[in-house]
Amino acid sequence: MIDDPRTADLREKVAALMPQAKRDLAQLVSFRSVADARQFPAEECERAAQWVADAFAGAGLTKVGLHETPDGSKAVIAARPAPHGAPTVLLYCHYDVQPPMDEAAWRTPPWELAEKEGRWYGRGSADCKGNIVMHLTALRALGPDLPLGVTLVADGSEEQCTDGLERFVEANPDLLRADAIVVGESGNVAVGVPTFTETLRGSVNVVVTLETLAGPMHSGMFGGAAPDALAALIQLLASLRDKRGNTTIAGLRTDQVWPGVQYPCEQFHADARVLGGVELTGDGTVADMLWARPALTVLGIDAPAVAGSAAAIQPIARARLNLRIPPGIDPRYAHTALVAHLEANTPWQAKLTIELESFGAPFESGTGGPARAAMEAALAASYGRPATTQGQGGSIPQCNVFADTYPDAEIMLLGVEEPTCLIHAPNESVDPKEIERMALAEALFLATYRSQGYSSVASSGWSTRNSVPAGAISTRRPK
């Protein structure tokens, strides 16, 4: 595939910027920017926020500031206003990261960028500091003469789900108003395969507690007749899935099919690191189970550890449950259905308490419009192949808030991540070629969006019809 002159020029500029991109990512990874002061010093997030602000000011965005959000985190907002009659593009990312988890499981230090076998390792290297570098490299390649308006927003507490940026956007809608929104918080189905993420699952999190006795009782003297709270919890949790692993909550359909690109079983086995001989769960295809059907996961159980456990019947047991729901299901309805199932299947009339932790609406993006057309062309030029589409099992609450606040804006989810990045796990990494290709695609998009026949949605009456299911609500942790 032979590049046109503009593509060839930007490809050369992005390639020349990759050593700087590596230095940028090394600096970002060095910030232990976990937005939880109980685990890491708050100064680490502040240092990361200031670095992001300074970097994008240096890349040509002229209105730069750190804005405190309702949860206490700082959102970095940097903007360059649009020339008269030109559109504005919002670039989203976040600088906070997940904790490293078990540092002993890392093959390289989690807070130092390390290169191994062609990949760059470190916490946040992909999610989402790699996407910050993608945005930054694209803007540096374009230089100061932007043909449109650009606003960058870097969230400071996305991983903590404390709604800081979401509530800030609702209270300050004009600060981030845009015609197109590029959410750099997703990625490709595989390395080298450009991908739009078109749907996100919503979620319902609850904590379930079962109580049966006033205190622990000796299993030899009372076992067999005394109701064991841990055994009751095990039986209750087992009722949430059938023998094939399908979620079995009455009222939640489990026969939907994914209409888009499929996820080969062999590839999923490798990506999910499924052990040899272990079967996948569910009656549908991998794509059906991941993106089109509800999925119940037990996140944690409070029970005695094996080491140090005694011969005692447990009086109380607790579990944290996560229910993922596809577009088309209202999270309030899903919560009601989950509660009804738990109440109907609690054994031995054990005392049941259900605490709602959080819920979030699913999301479905629009698929047409001038921004999408320009981005499709940019991805094809960068990668040398057409873009595909996927769903994503995770939730990105900001997408629902953006859709509610800016209903005429086109929202596109993409980024440098792919399954082998191991985001949220030890040994997170990114393929630098993905940063390079995605930065080139974004630069091409920003250079061509206006010339692709753009006209303001306000004057044209055109709408992307970003789809939020009827009755759905913006993602919000219960107060």
Image (spheres, rainbow, N blue to C red):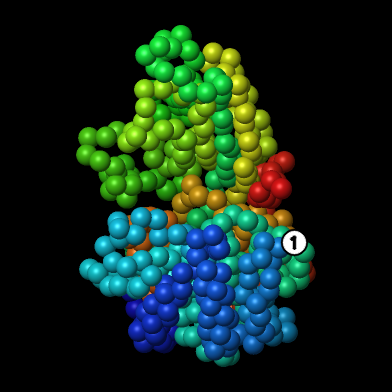
Q: Residue at x 73, y 84 (%)?
A: 84
Q: Residue at x 54, y 60 (%)?
A: 38
Report x, y in % for residue 165. 66, 63
Indicate the quadrant where residue 182 lies.
bottom right
Of residues 457 and 321, the one nearer the viewer is 321
Q: Is residue 379 visible?
A: no
Of residues 227 and 394, the one nearer the viewer is 227
- Judged from this view, the residue extending furthest toward the top is 225
Q: Is residue 265 visible?
A: yes
Q: Within 10 angstroms of label 1, few (less than 14), some, or many (20 or more) residues?
A: few
Report x, y in % for residue 68. 69, 71
Left or right of 170, for residue 361 = left
Check disc 1 and report the residue beneath it. 170
For badge 1, the amino acid type reads Glu
SS at badge 1: helix
Of residues 345 and 383, the one nearer the viewer is 345
Residue 395 versus residue 460 in the image, above or below: above
